[in-house]
Amino acid sequence: MSEHVLTEREGGVLILRMNRLEKKNALTRSMYKRMADAINQADQDASVRSLLITGGHECFTSGNDVADFLQAPPSGLNSEVFMFMQALFDFSKPAIAAVCGPAVGIGTTLLLHCDLVYVSRDATLKMPFVSLGLCPEYGSSMILPRLLGQAKATELLLLGSAFSGEQAAAWGIANQALHDSAATLAKAHDMAQRFGSLPPTALVDSKRLMRAPDREQLRQIIIEEGELFSQRLHSPEAREAMTAFMQRRKPDFSNL
């Protein structure tokens, strides 16, 4: 539903805000489609100089809506979630994220494709893919080992260990951890506005050059991860893990 993703213009900044707090901003297919369309339109709009993604003061996103995914698991690169991934991956202008509260699953991995990331110190980031019977997505299996080393990436991707906003900043996943949500949002808004005073073509060219060396390899990794992720959504392990999550019980993989 469109009310679950709000768009707002602030000068040359397009603000994209997830707005489903009653479900901790859990992402549905329609929300992914709405965000993908907004990002693609912003990329073509010369008056938009930067993109700011946020979930507001309380929560960034708890990740995918499990019920929505179980009802219609994404399959193929034309699914809504992959449309969103591609839109952000291909966005040619600066993308900024403001993260307050929980950032789970794609709520963490999408940050790896933003140019600037600001988090509140008490934010909680987590990628529990394996525990849900799934696999890493959105290029995280390539980006995180290179950024953090194999040992730390194993903690985060295989064990799904949670980490704080302060740790995200210390490890280079975020630019800065701020003391509270108000400061985080204010900092992200300020930085997004700064791009409006810079030459737009120089910005686009510079971002392209910075991301060019591994871009096509990363694109292929995202495709490969996505294909396996879609397969795993249909697996008995994923079905058991997600059903157990919805029933608020511990999953049992002993007979699978």
Image: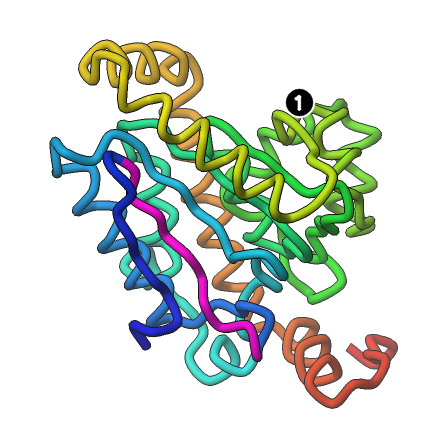
Q: Residues within 10 Å of mark 1 (few under 14, many from 20)?
A: some
Query: At 39% from the left edge and 33% from the top edge, which residue is drawn?
Result: 95
Q: Is residue 31 above or below residue 94?
A: below
Give the quarter of the image for residue 10: top left
Residue occupied by mark 1 = 147
Q: Is residue 74 on the magenta stretch?
A: no
Q: Is residue 163 above or below residue 215?
A: below
Query: At 55% from the left edge and 72% from the top edge, which residue is drawn?
Result: 21
Q: Main secondary structure of the magenta part?
A: strand
Give the quarter of the image for residue 146: top right
| Residue 131 horizontal/vertical position (percent) | 76, 62
Which residue, as the protein is rendered here, is positioned at the far bottom?
A: 247
Query: At 49% from the left edge and 40% from the top edge, which residue is drawn?
Result: 97
Q: Is residue 211 left or right of residue 208?
A: right
| Residue 190 horizontal/vertical position (percent) | 45, 30
Number of disc labels? 1
Viewer-side residue, 240 vs 209: 209
| Residue 118 horizontal/vertical position (percent) | 59, 35
Q: Amino acid at mark 1?
A: Leu
Q: Is residue 15 on the magenta stretch?
A: yes
Q: Is residue 120 above or below residue 256?
A: above
The part of the chain drawn in magenta is 13-22
Q: Is residue 90 above or below residue 123?
A: above
Q: Is residue 34 left or right of residue 164?
A: left
Viewer-side residue, 27 vs 244: 27
| Residue 161 horizontal/vertical position (percent) | 82, 49
Q: Is residue 214 left or right of residue 101?
A: left
Which secondary structure lies at badge 1? helix
Query: At 37% from the left edge and 22% from the top edge, which residue is drawn?
Result: 194
Q: Is residue 32 left or right of residue 128?
A: left
